[in-house]
Image (cartoon, rainbow, N blue to C red):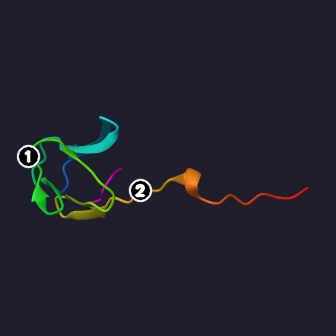
Amino acid sequence: MALSSSMVSKLHAEIFEGDDQLMVRDLGSTNGTFVNLEPLASSSALSDGDLLHFADQECRLVSVKLEDQPVARSEE
């Protein structure tokens, strides 16, 4: 994901899967990465609803399970 802000470093942070859960780590950014308003010192596990800040950009983590969504089917 790319964020359009001069405050966000070119390679700011990484969201990845580790130990069967989403994780985030800062990649040496100038203006920091925050999870639920706490500065990220190392990698951190993420949960549904977490608030992420990449410098001055705010994002909310929302999980969507497509397999649980109803599917429209045509009857033949």
| Residue situated furthest top in the rendering | 19
Q: Position of residue 27 (x, y in %)?
A: 17, 41
Q: Position of residue 18 (x, y in %)?
A: 29, 35
Which residue is at 50% across, 53% downward? 65
Horizontal arrangement in the rendering, residue 41 relative to residue 55 (left or right): left
Q: Amino acid at mark 2?
A: Ser
Which residue is at 32% across, 42% downward? 21
Judging depth in this view, the residue of 52 and 54 nearest the camera is 52
Q: CA distance from mark 2 to mark 1?
A: 24 Å
- Above or below: residue 29 compared with residue 17: below
Label 2: how many Cα within 10 Å (few below 14, some 14–19, many 20+): few
Q: Residue 2 in magenta?
A: yes
Q: Label 2's element?
A: loop
Q: Amino acid at mark 1?
A: Ala
- Above or below: residue 4 compared with residue 45: below
Q: Residue 71 in magenta?
A: no
Horizontal arrangement in the rendering, residue 74 relative to residue 36 (left or right): right
Q: Which residue is mark 1?
A: 41
Which residue is at 41% across, 56% downward? 63
Q: Position of residue 16 (x, y in %)?
A: 31, 40
- 2 or 1: mark nearer the eye: 2
Total labels drawn? 2
The quarter of the rendered structure image containing the C terminus is bottom right
Q: Position of residue 67 (x, y in %)?
A: 57, 50
Q: Which residue is mark 2?
A: 63
Which residue is at 36% across, 50% downward? 1
- Above or below: residue 74 compared with residue 13: below
Give the magenta part as a residue range. Answer: 1-5
